[in-house]
Image (spheres, rainbow, N blue to C red):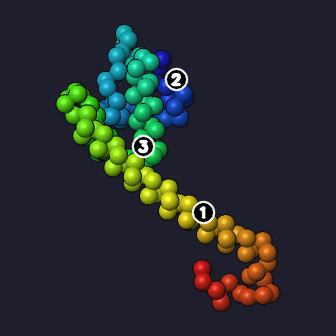
Amino acid sequence: MTITEVGEKYGLTPDTLRYYERIGLIPSVNRKRGGVRDYTEEDCRWVEFAKCMRAAGLSIEVLLEYLALFERGDETIEKRKRLLIEQRDQLAARIEEMRDTLKRLDGKIQKYEEGWFTGKKRESETAP
């Protein structure tokens, strides 16, 4: 697959894909004649992994650490597992915070829909 095709498939720009490759977030992609990148299924799995982890909030630094451990082989399995558990725990905490925020927003919207701020009490007389 070309860089354009991979970008369209995963919703990433070619610049992002080049950047991920340049910093080592995805392995170097083989090239055809003329230097055109030729993504394999394995390359695409790396792209998908990077996109998923970034969308979940993992930093590039954490992902690079994970990949460095991965490249060192089986001796790093426990370290990789601990790193992933730590990141999962951080993600779970962020999800809980977002759930709380969603509840608060829903409550605020409900008050507007009920006309709570018009006529009954002015918004300035209540907590934000």
Hey, what amino acid is under mark 3? Arg
Residue linked to disc 3: 54
Kindly identify which numbered label has been placed on residue 123.
none
Q: Quadrant of the C terminus?
A: bottom right
90 above or below 15?
below
- Which label's residue is closer to the chain start, 1 or 2? 2
User: Callout 2: helix, strand or loop?
Assistant: helix
What x and y, as percent, mark residue 100?
55, 65
Which of the two residues, 18 or 80, is positioned nearer the viewer here?
Answer: 80
How far apart are the two marked residues, 1 and 2, measured between alpha carbons? 36 Å
Residue at the spot 78% in from the left edge and 87% down from the top edge: 120
User: In front here: 53 or 6?
Assistant: 53
Q: What element carries label 3?
A: helix
* Residue plotted at (73% across, 75% down): 111
Secondary structure at numbered mark 1: helix
Residue under label 1, please give it.
102
Q: How far apart are marks 3 and 2 (CA)?
A: 20 Å
* Residue at the disc numbered 2: 5
Q: Is residue 15 visible?
A: no
Q: Residues within 10 Å of mark 1 (few under 14, many from 20)?
A: few
Instruction: Find residue 114 and report its image quarter.
Output: bottom right
In the rendered structure, the answer to whether residue 92 lies left or right of residue 64 reads right
**Cα–Cα span, label 3 and label 1:** 22 Å
